[in-house]
Image (cartoon, rainbow, N blue to C red):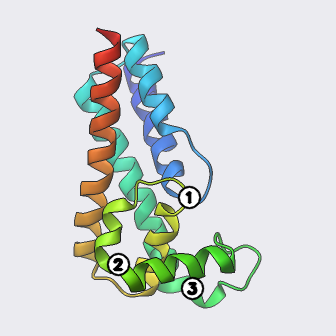
């Protein structure tokens, strides 16, 4: 696999992982690092950008399409949405630092759009949270590989 293919594959894995669709970008990152595909700093950068863009898709869904939340095609079930709203109401915008977390991170980004969190603030917190997660994954993988 070429380095370009590795970067593109990781980008799309990270993008899909940030949406409600299942994804395995951390596993893809570790596999690429293990195989020596690409530069770690570029893999990190590509994964963060892809994952943040996936969260931006969620924010847009929340901002402009939440009135369709009762439809079957809406990515969150009502229970998931209500739980995320509860977290958001209780802990505030700072919960977006946890947007990387499995199960409730993605719903938080949709709720942030629905609650009309300023896009710049959203982008800052989500990027910080996701970058910290991928930095941990890269550092842990590289430490094990040494």
- Residue 34 is drawn in which quadrant? top left
Residue at image position (40%, 66%) is 56
- Residue 96 is drawn in which quadrant? bottom left
Secondary element under disc 1, as helix, strand or loop, is: loop
Give the residue pinned by disc 2.
91
Counting from the top left corner in percent of width and height, residue 139 is at: 27, 27
Counting from the top left corner in percent of width and height, residue 22 is at: 62, 49
Residue at image position (40%, 54%) is 100
Q: Nearer the viewer, residue 128 or 40?
A: 128
Q: Which numbered disc, 1 or 3, marks the residue closer to the eye? A: 1
- Asked whether the beta carbons under mark 1 and mark 2 sit within 8 Å of each other, the answer is no
Q: Upstream in the sequence, badge 2 or badge 3?
A: 3
- Asked whether the beta carbons under mark 1 and mark 3 sit within 8 Å of each other, the answer is no
**Disc 1 versus disc 2: distance between alpha carbons?**
17 Å
Q: Residues within 10 Å of mark 2 (few under 14, many from 20)?
A: few
**Disc 1 versus disc 3: distance between alpha carbons?**
19 Å
Q: Upstream in the sequence, badge 1 or badge 3?
A: 3
Residue at image position (45%, 58%) is 54
Q: Upstream in the sequence, badge 1 or badge 2?
A: 2
Give the residue pinned by disc 3.
66
- Asked whether the beta carbons under mark 2 and mark 3 sit within 8 Å of each other, the answer is no
Secondary element under disc 2, as helix, strand or loop, is: helix
Q: Residues within 10 Å of mark 1 (few under 14, many from 20)?
A: few
**Disc 2 versus disc 3: distance between alpha carbons?**
21 Å
Q: Which numbered disc, 1 or 2, marks the residue closer to the eye? A: 2
Q: Nearer the viewer, residue 67 or 140?
A: 140
Residue at image position (39%, 31%) is 7
Q: Residues within 10 Å of mark 3 (few under 14, many from 20)?
A: some
**Residue at the limit of the structure toward the bottom, as seen here:** 67
Secondary element under disc 3, as helix, strand or loop, is: helix
Give the residue pinned by disc 1.
103
């Amino acid at each position: 696999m070429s380095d370009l293919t590795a970067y593109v594959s990781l980008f799309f894995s990270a993008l899909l992982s940030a949406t409600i669709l299942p994804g395995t970008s951390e596993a893809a990152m570790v596999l690429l690092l293990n195989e020596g595909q690409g530069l770690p700093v570029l893999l990190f950068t590509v994964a963060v950008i892809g994952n943040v863009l996936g969260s931006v898709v969620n924010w847009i869904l929340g901002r402009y399409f939440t009135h369709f939340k009762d439809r079957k095609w809406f990515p969150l079930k009502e229970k998931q949405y209500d739980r995320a709203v509860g977290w958001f109401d209780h802990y505030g915008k700072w919960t977006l630092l946890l947007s990387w977390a499995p199960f409730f991170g993605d719903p938080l980004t949709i709720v942030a759009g629905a609650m009309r969190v300023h896009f710049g603030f959203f982008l800052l917190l989500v990027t910080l949270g996701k970058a910290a997660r991928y930095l941990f994954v890269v550092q842990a993988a590289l430490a094990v590989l040494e």
